[in-house]
Image (spheres, grey):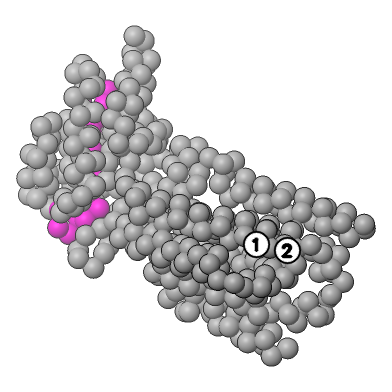
């Protein structure tokens, strides 16, 4: 009889342990993949966009300060990518279309950052931007970060994991990033949900414009 | 005692950083070789501990239910895509892996398996077959990369690994169903 009680007690302890383990391990059952956990954490921490030097498709060099006072809608890509980047950029193109024109360039800037600076020189980026209807190199810019250390620092801050594979491609996680007027990361959006992403951006802009 | 030494040596070998790094560099080996081997080390070390502390096991795991539950929880925990990722990037998660799999999964499994009823064995075995099928489908069909540290192609390989394991388990179930075996041989 006594043993039975101990068994029951042990069972309850094990179940409680299991609950706590899963509760903590999945951030209160909200994140079962590291990617979800990463996004949750980023939105919570709101890191500042680091001071890195871009070189865009028109060979201009500047830092994030270039866009001070504007929201910046960012993706991380490399132009040789044949899979997810194309989707990512196509979807970015559609988000661009959904954003009211009066905000464009005044309140919001589009920016695609290449993490493959060796191959993505300004000429290559200039070609790449033409693949997308809104890729004008001005309101939607494509830029690389030549300095490897700066690039890695940025990727690390924004939780972008890039793994080179043996065929010269990269596996990487993708999302839309929204940086506010002061250069703080405020949103990480699912790049597959175009309308949702656009609505989030528009509602932020509308609210600030007092619409 | 001999078993304990084998288990302990294997454990030390698996914990060595270069060995761990190699095993973890390939997704399917990480989940379907390193992790089961860690359970095996616990399994091998269990007997010695059972003999050393018979009262503890008797008292707290008399009917085997707490042990088998603990094993299941630990094993399920390590099947999550997130824990696999974090074992690579977060040090204390890695540490927890090396502690939990042998000591909280391997040892209780050995102690429990002989104690639980045939019905519970069947439930346990069939549940894990179903879970493996589910995980296999998940890893194969997920359109996105579930683990940030592994390529999509590795994820698909892992999915097939799960399915293969599940099929073997199904074959075993049929074998068990259609051959006349005394219960204790399960």
Residue B28 vertical position relative to residue A69 in the rendered view, above or below: below
Task: Please tell me how crowded label 1 is: few (under 14), some (14-19), or many (20+) other residues with Cα within 10 Å.
Answer: some
Could you say where residue A79 lies in the image, as x and y percent from the top left? 16, 50
Q: Judge from the rendering whether residue A36 lies leftward or rightward of residue A131; answer left or right.
A: right
Q: Position of residue A122 (x, y in %)?
A: 11, 49
Which class describes the residues within 10 Å of circle 2: few (<14), some (14-19), or many (20+)?
some
Q: Quadrant of the N terminus of chain B?
A: bottom right
Q: Which mark is residue B121?
A: 1
- Which element type, helix, strand or loop, lies under badge 2? loop
Q: Position of residue B115 (x, y in %)?
A: 75, 67
Is any part of residue B103 visible from this angle? no
The range drawn in magenta is A105-120
Alpha carbon of mark 1 to alpha carbon of mark 2: how far? 7 Å
Q: Mark 2, chain letter? A: B
The answer to whether B115 appears left or right of B92 in the picture is right
**Mark sitting earlier along the chain (1/2):** 2
What residue sits right under mark 2 in the picture?
Answer: B116
Say if the magenta span includes residue A119.
yes
Residue at image coords 53%, 40%:
A30
Tell me which residue sits at (18%, 32%) in the image: A93
Mark 1–mark 2 CB contact (< 8 Å)? yes
Displayed quadrant of residue A108: top left
**Closest to the observer, A4 or A40:** A4
Left or right: where A25 falls relative to A48: right
């Amino acid at each position: 009889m006594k043993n039975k009680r101990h068994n029951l007690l042990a069972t309850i302890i094990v179940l409680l342990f299991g609950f706590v383990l899963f509760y903590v391990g999945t951030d209160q059952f909200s994140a079962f993949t590291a990617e979800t956990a990463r996004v949750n954490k980023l939105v919570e921490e709101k890191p500042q966009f680091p001071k890195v030097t871009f070189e865009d498709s028109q060979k201009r060099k500047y830092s994030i300060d270039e866009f001070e006072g504007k929201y910046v809608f960012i993706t991380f890509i490399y132009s040789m990518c044949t899979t997810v980047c194309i989707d990512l950029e196509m979807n970015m193109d559609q988000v661009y279309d959904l954003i009211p024109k009066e905000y464009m360039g005044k309140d919001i800037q589009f920016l695609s950052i290449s993490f493959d600076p060796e191959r993505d020189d300004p000429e290559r980026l200039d070609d790449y931007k033409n693949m997308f209807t809104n890729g004008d190199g001005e309101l939607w810019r494509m830029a690389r970060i030549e300095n490897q250390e700066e690039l890695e620092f940025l990727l690390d801050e924004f939780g972008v994991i890039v793994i080179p594979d043996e065929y010269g491609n990269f596996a990487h996680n993708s999302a839309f990033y929204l940086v506010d007027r002061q250069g703080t990361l405020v949103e990480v959006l699912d790049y597959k949900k175009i309308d949702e992403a656009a609505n989030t951006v528009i509602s932020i802009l509308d609210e600030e414009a007092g619409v | 005692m001999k078993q304990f030494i084998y288990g302990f040596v294997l454990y030390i070998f698996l914990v060595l950083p270069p060995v761990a790094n190699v095993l973890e560099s390939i997704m399917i080996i990480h989940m379907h070789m390193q992790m089961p081997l860690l359970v095996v080390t616990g399994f091998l070390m269990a007997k010695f501990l059972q003999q050393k502390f018979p009262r503890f096991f008797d008292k707290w795991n008399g009917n085997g239910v707490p042990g088998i539950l603990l094993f299941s929880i630990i094993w399920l925990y390590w099947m999550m895509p997130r824990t696999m990722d974090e074992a690579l990037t977060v040090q204390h998660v890695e540490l927890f892996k090396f502690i939990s799999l042998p000591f909280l999964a391997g040892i209780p499994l050995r102690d429990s398996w002989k104690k639980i009823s045939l019905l519970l064995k069947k439930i346990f075995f069939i549940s894990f077959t179903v879970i493996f099928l589910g995980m296999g489908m998940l890893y194969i069909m997920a359109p996105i990369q579930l683990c940030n540290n592994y390529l999509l192609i590795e994820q698909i390989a892992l999915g097939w690994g799960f399915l293969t394991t599940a099929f073997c388990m199904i074959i075993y179930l049929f074998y068990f169903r259609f051959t006349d075996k005394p219960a204790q041989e399960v």
